[in-house]
Amino acid sequence: MNIPKQWRVILPSVDRFRPEKKFPGVFNPDERGITLIELLVTLSILGFVITALYTFYLSGLKSWNRSIDSMEYQQSARIAMNKMINEIRYAHAVEIRSGNNEILYYWAEHKGKSTLFRFRLSGNQLLFEQRSENDTHYAYNVIALGISGLSFAIDENNTVLITIRAGDGTKEVILSSSVRPRNIPLQLDAYE
């Protein structure tokens, strides 16, 4: 068969298109695979990457927990401070006891009876206690948890200074505030 030269197509050899015969268990030097050393190096690099990621994850988790604890201590101290300020604001008489860690105050007499109120620390709980004049009625509420310190002071103008410590160690939160009981008269000699 004569084909003109310009129409001739050069075809690759037929041997290139024949499938290779592969026999299991026979080593073929043309095949490429991974060696045991390459596998070990890859696994060790993967191990380092996973270890680094896990370390970052753990440090982030610890930071998250510290911030949650700090927020809880701040919230607990804030709630306690607001409760004490709101209660002491309407007192008729105030007395500090137990080395400045406890405050007693009285409200106006109702039908000839007065009621004693007290804020004090019991362990890490801030307690709000109510007691009747003749001790026939006693009740208490836990105002806040995680309180590590509580201190009171009264200045010359009958202003009550309150300091609350919540938390422990590096997570400690300190709040300070003051309140002047409205029903206690001012001492005029302080202004002279």
Image: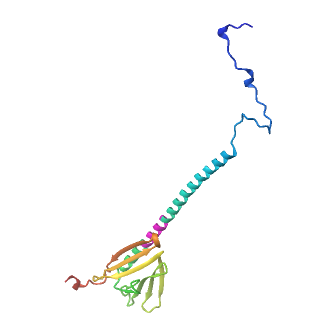
The stretch in magenta equals 67-77
- Give residue 90's position: percent from left, percent from top: 35, 80
- Residue at figure coordinates x 79%, y 31% from the top left: 21
Quadrant, the C terminus: bottom left
Q: Quadrant of residue 85?
A: bottom left
User: As rendered, which of 109 and 74 lies closer to the eye?
Assistant: 74
Q: Is residue 169 magenta?
A: no
Outermost residue to the left: 192
Q: With 178 as the anchor, is 140 left or right in this view?
A: right
Q: With 176 as the anchor, is 187 left or right in this view?
A: left
Quadrant, the N terminus: top right
Q: With 132 as the anchor, is 42 left or right in this view?
A: right
Q: Is residue 165 above or below residue 188?
A: above
- Residue at figure coordinates x 74%, y 21% from the top left: 14
- Residue at figure coordinates x 66%, y 49% from the top left: 40
User: As rendered, which of 130 and 177 lies closer to the eye?
Assistant: 177
Q: Quadrant of residue 102?
A: bottom left
Outermost residue to the bottom: 134
Q: Is residue 45 above or below residue 110?
A: above
User: As rendered, which of 121 and 181 lies closer to the eye?
Assistant: 121
Q: Number of numbered discs present?
A: 0
User: As rendered, which of 37 and 152 lies closer to the eye?
Assistant: 37
- Give residue 124's position: percent from left, percent from top: 48, 78
Q: Is residue 71 magenta?
A: yes
- Give residue 36's position: percent from left, percent from top: 69, 46
Tell me which secondary structure the magenta stretch mostly adopts: helix
Q: Is residue 37 above or below residue 142?
A: above
- Give residue 112's position: percent from left, percent from top: 37, 91
Check the image and tell me how it is coloured: rainbow
